[in-house]
Amino acid sequence: MKDGALPLASTPPVPTVGTSQPHDAACRHVRGTAPYIDDLPEPAGLLHAAIGLSRHAHGRLKALDLAKVLAFPGVIAVLSAADIPGENNVGPVVKDDPILAESLIEFHGQALFAVAADTLHAARRAARLEVAEVEPLPAILTIGDAMAVESFILKPERMARGDAATAIAGAAHRLSGTLEMGGQDHFYLEGQISLAIPTEEGGVLVYCSTQHPSEVQHLVAHALGIPDALVTVEVRRLGGGFGGKETQAAQFAALAALFALKTGRPVKLRLDRDDDMVMTGKRHDFRVRYQVGFDAEGRIEGLAVELAARCGYSADLSGAINDRAMFHIDNCYYLPHVAVDSYRLKTNTVSNTAFRGFGGPQGMLAIEAVLDDIARVRGLDPLAVRRANLYGPGRDVTPYGQTVDDGIGPRLIARLAESADYAARRAAIARFNAQNRFVKRGLALTPVKFGISFTTTFLNQAGALIHVYTDGSVQVNHGGIEMGQGLYQKIRQVVADCFGIGLNRILATATTTGKVPNTSATAASSGADMNGKAAEAAALTIRGRLAAFAAQKYGVPEAAVCFVGGQVQAGEARVGFADLVRAAYLARVSLSATGFYATPKIHFDRATFSGRPFLYYAYGAAVAEVEVDCLTGENRLLRADILHDCGTSLNPALDKGQIEGGFIQGMGWLTMEELVWDAQGRLRTHAPSTYKIPVCRDVPEAFTVTLWDEPNREDTIHHSKAVGEPPLMLANAVFFALRDAVAATAPLPGPLPGGPVPLDAPATPERVLTAIMTLSGTA
Amino acid sequence: MTTLSVSLTVNGKKVSADVEPRTLLVQLLRENLHLTGTHVGCDTSQCGACTVHVNGDSVKSCTILAAQADGADVRTIEGLAQAGVLHAVQEAFREHHGLQCGFCTPGMVMSSADLLVKNPNPSEHEIRTWLEGNICRCTGYHNIVKAVQHAAQTLRQTAQAAE
C-alpha cells in the first residue's frame, strides 16, 4: 500500500473487528517513514536543550554559577528555578515535583538547571559544567533505612477483613517469611523528548512523547503561568511507554516550553539515554513480610502482609500504585481473614512511577510467594496449593468487597494444565532432576487475575472526534496514545465497521489536546476499552444522522437502513457510502461528531477501602519450564505455554503481541533486570551495558500463546477485554519455575526442612547460585 | 572549527558533506541527509536501532564516525525497498507483526536483511543469536523471529525461481 493514501478498495470491504490486522503504521515502520518526534523536520532557528543534574542524593543548594554556563560557546539561554514564571512543579497529584530544584536537592540526578544552545553537543557539554555549590545532607536510600525512621511520602494504608491475627494463631500450620523484589527501568527505545514551538498570543505547541498529553498541557500551562487553552500538546506515536511516559514526560515538556517562550525560538529537549535512566522514575521495588496460617492442604485461613515500597523523593503516582498492589494481594485466591499494611516510603532516590501493572505485579508476586513457601515447607506441589486457594462458590469476595463470580480463573487454569501437559512434565522433571546433579529443571504454573479500570474512578472517561469528508473518507481522533499496542488500528477497525466501509478509508490522526480535551492517560490497560467506546459513540452519532437522512430520502424506516460492504442499503435502494455522504452534505447534514464514554458500574470508598473499583477482571495463566546450572546459577527458560483472556479479541494478532511482549518484559523484571544504587545514592546501571534487558536469545523457541475464547460479560467494546498490563504478570511462572529448580537441589526430596526457597527477585544467576548454596548446604 | 569533507554513496546516490571530525555516521545520515528512519535509541552502540549497511555489512551507525564511512557504500532503511516494492524482510515484518512501537524496526530489518544475505537458510537459533545486538522492548521477539523465517523462505523461493 502506498504511504498516506486512502484508496477505495477494489473489492467490497468486509468487517474487520475480531480479525488479525497489522499495526496501523506497520507499512511505514518497515520503511522508516513513521516519524517520531526526533524525526520531524526541524523548524528554522531550533535550539537544543539539556539539563544539569545534581551530583548529591540529598543536600542544600547554596548557589548556582549560571554565568559560567551562559558563557559556554553556543549557549543561548539558561534556566533555574527562579526563572520559571508560573509554578515550578510538575507533580501529578501532590505538588512535590519541582521542575528545577530550588533550595533542596532530594536525589542524585535531580534537575538543577537547564541550558539551551545552538547545537545538542554544546547544550550537553554546558549542562555538565560543575556550577552547583551544595551542602550535603545524610541520605535515606533503602527500604530498610526508610522503614527504620518511618520516612513516609504518603500515609500508610490498611486493607483488612475479618481477624487475620486470630485466624493465623488458630490455624493448624503457620509460616512467616519475606520477599524482596527489585524495580525496573522502562527502557522505552525512544527516550524522553519534547519539541516546543512558540505560538501566537504567548502560547506554545508541544510535540511530546507522553502517554498523558492533557496532563502535560496543564502542567506546561501552570509552569508558564498561562491558561491551558494557550498550550497544545500533540502526540502521534511513542517509541514505547510502558508507564514511563505517563507522568515523567511533563518535566521535559515544561523545560522545552519555558525555553521556547523565553527565547521565542523552537526548542527540542531529547534526553541522553544515561540521563534518562538516572532522571526518570522506575517500577517500585518492594519488601514483603508476611505471616500466614493454613490447613494441611495449604489452604490459607489468615494472612497478614506488610508491603513496603520505595517511592523515592516525591509522591508521583505512588498512592494509586500502592493501592493497586493491595488490590492484587489476592490474585486468584480467596483470603478469608486478611490484613494488608502498605507503607509508601520516602527515600532520596528518583521518584518511582507507573510501570505496566502499576503495583499489581508486586502485590501478585507477594501472594504467589506465600503460596510457594507454603508448598515448599509442606512438601506439596505448588499448583495443588494454588488450586486449593482459588476463588469459588461461597469463597468469592475480594478483601475489598468486589465479588469474583465469573468462574474464569479455575477453568482457565485447568485447561492450561491439561494443554501444557503439566502433570506429565512434572513427573519427567522429577526424573531428570534425580539423574542430573549439576543441572536442575523447574516447572511452575501461575495464574493472573487483573482488575480493569483506573482505581481513581473519575479517570475512567474518554472522548473521540470523527469527521466524515464529502468523498466518504474519515478521520478519527481520540484521547488515546499509540505506543505500539496497536490502539489506532483497533479504533480504525471499530469505526470502519460502524460505517460498513473499508479500514483503508479511515485515517487515525495524531492525538492532540486541540481536538479531544481533558483526556485521561493511556494507562491502566484502558486505551481500547475507553477510546474504542468513545469512537464508536461518535461514529454511531454520525451514522444515525446518515440513517435518518437516508430513511427520509428513500421513504423507509430508519431501522431499514444498514451500512455494509461500503454501501448503504435503504429498503430496496442501494447507494455507495460516499454518495450518501455527499448527498447528506448537500442536504446540510452535519458530518462531524464527538463521542464520550464513562465506564459504568464502578465505585470505591477510600475510607473503608471497599467497593467495586473494577468493571471486570482479565485473566491468564502461564506454565514455564527452566533449566539451572547449579555451579554458576546461570539459567534459561526452556518452554512457555500461555493461555490468556482477551474476551472477544478486537484483533488477535495485536493482542497476542501484547501477551508475548508483556510476558518477556515481566521475565526481564523477575530474572535479569537489576537496578543498582551505590552508597552515595548513584544509580550504577544507567545504560544497557550494565542493565540487562531480555534479548532475542533469552526467549525460548518453545513459546505458545493461546487466547481464551469467551466474550467479556460486561458491555465493553465488542465484548473484548483489556490486554496491556495483565500479561506482564504471566512471567511470575518463570520466577517460580526457577524456585522450583532451586528446590530440587535440596539434599532430600519432600518438605524443605530449613524453610522456603530463599530466592528474591530479580533471580539473577548470582541470586540463584546463592539460593542453591544455602539450600543444598554448600554455602 | 575543523571540518572534514566526506563523500560516500547513500542508497545509491553520491553525497558529500563537510562535517566535524567527531561526527558519527548516524548524525551524518539524520542531520545532514535527513534520513531519519535510522533511529538513535541508546546513544552507546548497544540497542541496534541505528543499524545500517556499510559496504554490505550491518553496522551500528552510532558506533562509527562519518569520516570512517568516507568512500563507502551505505544503505539505510529508506533505501531497502526497490522501486517502491518492499524488501522481503520489510514485507515479512509488516505481515507477521514483527513490530509494535516500531522504533527498533529499521535496525531490526537492516540487521535481518544482512543475516539473510550471509546465511540464506538460518536456523531459529542462528536468527536469535544474530539479532542479539538489537533490543526490542515491545514484542518479546517472537514475531520478529517468525518474520525473519518467513523472509528467508521468500528470498530462497525468489532465488530458486531466478535460477
Image (tube, grey):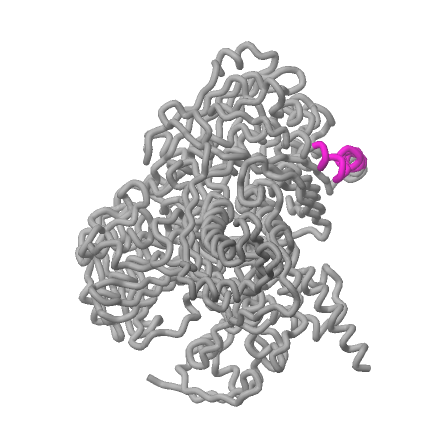
Q: In the image, A165: left or right of A372? A: left
Residue A426 drawn in magenta? yes
Residue A601 drawn in magenta? no
Q: In the image, B80: left or right of A126? A: right
**Residue A667 in the image: above or below residue A294:** below
Residue at horizontal 58 percent and vertical 42 percent from the top: A719
Residue B20 in picture, x, y percent from top left? 39, 82
Residue A516 in picture, x, y percent from top left? 37, 54
Most prominent secondary structure in the magenta stretch? Answer: helix
The answer, for residue A615, to whether it is visible in the render is: yes
Residue A201 in picture, x, y percent from top left? 20, 65
Residue at horizontal 76 percent and vertical 76 percent from the top: B158
Image quadrant holding the C terminus of chain A, namely top right
**Residue A465 in the image: above or below residue B41:** above
Residue A623 in picture, x, y percent from top left? 68, 39
**Residue A292 in the image: above or below residue B79:** above
The answer, for residue B99, to whether it is visible in the render is: no
| Residue sitting nearer the eye, A133 or A356 | A356
Q: Which residues are drawn in magenta?
A: A414-431
| Residue sitting nearer the eye, B12 or B7 | B12
Q: In the image, A86: left or right of A483? A: left
